[in-house]
Each structure stands twice: as structure tokens, then as C-alpha cells.
Image (cartoon, helix red, strand yellow):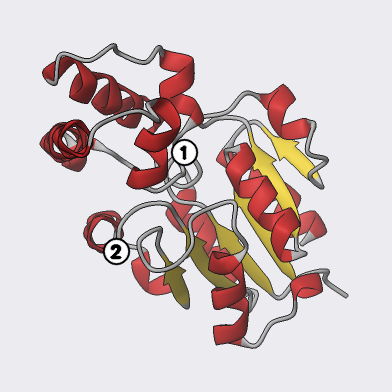
């Protein structure tokens, strides 16, 4: 008997190799506005949060004008190279293998709805997800709202749901929603930080994730 019916994936840094691009876009947006540029660690730490929470975390004392200026330039830099972002090797095949085993798949992401819909069209496997939930559609991570919405929509209980992500925000989301979590160390946050939140596993590649899921999911 398998352990889960629903597998929920984070997007950036979990399914697609976008971590460096997001961090650089954040840094460039500050530089464009003549504001102190966050270091790489800080820029990566906020990946997975919604834009509002991202910049409030990095710079809680921004004026409304400064905040809007950073958001505008971030979107410019991110979109400038958005089409160069690709899914991790084996992602499409792995997701198809899971659907063939009758798992329900979903996405919980800090991306905007417009951004995720654009990304889903680019990668070509968006049809495999039964539900997707974005950062601008409710409370952002690590509030349990995203997972609660997905579970309610698909009528799956927390004990039958698994959340997978590359950040502590994802694993805290899982904890807050009462689900299990698995960390992936090839994205934004370091492995030690993920392991500290006691996920069921913490894997180093998408291929390793698939092996774990097929053995333990």
C-alpha cells in the first residue's frame, strides 16, 4: 500500500532550474534603484515567497515608491531571460511516471498566476497537474492556505499528501498544513537548513527524488 495520494511540488528550484536567475534578478532590481544590493545568500533565502513578502523581508523600511520600483525592475529582469529557464533533467518523464501510477499532482508556488501560467506553457507538462495555487491567490508560504486549498479542491486529507520543495518555506508550509514534506537540496536553500526541519527525506537531484518517490510514495 502506498503512503500518499497527492504529491504537491514547489516550482522554482524544485521542478525548474531558476534559482540563480531569480537571485540575480532580485540583486539587479536593487542596483537599478540605487539601493543596497542584497548578497546572494539573502536573495536566495526569499525565493519561494510572494513578491510583497520577498521585498518586505529584504528591506522592511522601503517606501511605497521604492518598493514599486524594485518590483518593476525585478519583473523586467526576470522576464528578460524567462525563456532560458528549463526544467531539471528528467522532470517531464518523472511526472508522467507518477501520473501513470495514479498519483494526483499539484503545484504550490510563490509565483504569480500570470507567471506560473506562462511557465506552464513553456515547459509543456502543465497538463499533468490537477491543481495549481499561486502566491497572489491567497496567503503566501509558509501559511498553510496553499496546501489547504489544494487538498480541499481534490478531497485529499493531509495524511495522504506530500509536499516537495527546495526551501524551508516549503517544508514549513507542509508542517503548518499537517502534511509530510521532502526537501530537495539542488535549489535555493542549503541542505542543512532543510534537514533541520525533519523532512521525510532530503535528496540531491530530481533523479534521486524520483527513485525515492517510487520506493516510498
Residue drawn at point x = 57 percent, y = 41 percent: 206
Question: Which image quarter holds the C terminus?
Answer: bottom right
> Alpha carbon of mark 2 to alpha carbon of mark 1: how far?
17 Å
Q: How many dots with numbers?
A: 2
Q: Can residue 40 be seen in this view?
A: yes
Across and down, in percent, residue 53 comes to 42, 43
Secondary structure at numbered mark 1:
loop
Determine which residue is flagged by label 1: 13
Name the foreground residue: 152 vs 9.
152
- Direction from residue 35 to residue 157 in the image, left or right: right
Name the foreground residue: 173 vs 61.
61
Residue drawn at point x = 58 percent, y = 38 percent: 167
Mark found first going from the N terminus, 2 or 1:
1
Splitting the image into 4 quarters, where does residue 6 fall?
A: bottom right
Name the foreground residue: 143 vs 125.
143
Residue 154 is tagged as none
Task: Please tell me how crowded label 1 is: few (under 14), some (14-19), or many (20+) other residues with Cα within 10 Å.
Answer: many
Splitting the image into 4 quarters, where does residue 208 fall?
A: top right
Task: Please tell me how crowded label 2 is: few (under 14), some (14-19), or many (20+) other residues with Cα within 10 Å.
Answer: some
Q: Is residue 114 above or below residue 131?
A: above
Q: Is residue 129 visible?
A: no
Secondary structure at numbered mark 2:
helix
Across and down, in percent, residue 212 comes to 74, 49
- Direction from residue 200 to residue 41 in the image, left or right: left
Determine which residue is flagged by label 2: 113
- Direction from residue 186 to residue 160 in the image, left or right: right
Amino acid at each position: 500500500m502506498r503512503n500518499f495520494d497527492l504529491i504537491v511540488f514547489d516550482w522554482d528550484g524544485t521542478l525548474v532550474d531558476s534559482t540563480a536567475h531569480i537571485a540575480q534578478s532580485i540583486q539587479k532590481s536593487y542596483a537599478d534603484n540605487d539601493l543596497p544590493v542584497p548578497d546572494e545568500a539573502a536573495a536566495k533565502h526569499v525565493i519561494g515567497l510572494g513578491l510583497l513578502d520577498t521585498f518586505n523581508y529584504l528591506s522592511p523600511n522601503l517606501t511605497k515608491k521604492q518598493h514599486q520600483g524594485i518590483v518593476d525592475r525585478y519583473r523586467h529582469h526576470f522576464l528578460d531571460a524567462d525563456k532560458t529557464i528549463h526544467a531539471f533533467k528528467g522532470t517531464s518523464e518523472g511526472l508522467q511516471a507518477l501520473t501513470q501510477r495514479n498519483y494526483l499532482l499539484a503545484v504550490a508556488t510563490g509565483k504569480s498566476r500570470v507567471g506560473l501560467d506562462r511557465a506552464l506553457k513553456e515547459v509543456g507538462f502543465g497538463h499533468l497537474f490537477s491543481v495549481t495555487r499561486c502566491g497572489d491567490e491567497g496567503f503566501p508560504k509558509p501559511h498553510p492556505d496553499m496546501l489547504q486549498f489544494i487538498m480541499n479542491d481534490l478531497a485529499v486529507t493531509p495524511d495522504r499528501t506530500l509536499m516537495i520543495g527546495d526551501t524551508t518555506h516549503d517544508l514549513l508550509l507542509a508542517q503548518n498544513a499537517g502534511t509530510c514534506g521532502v526537501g530537495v537540496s539542488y535549489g535555493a536553500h542549503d541542505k542543512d537548513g532543510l534537514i533541520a526541519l525533519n523532512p521525510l527525506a532530503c535528496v540531491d537531484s530530481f533523479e534521486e527524488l524520483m527513485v525515492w518517490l517510487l520506493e516510498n510514495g
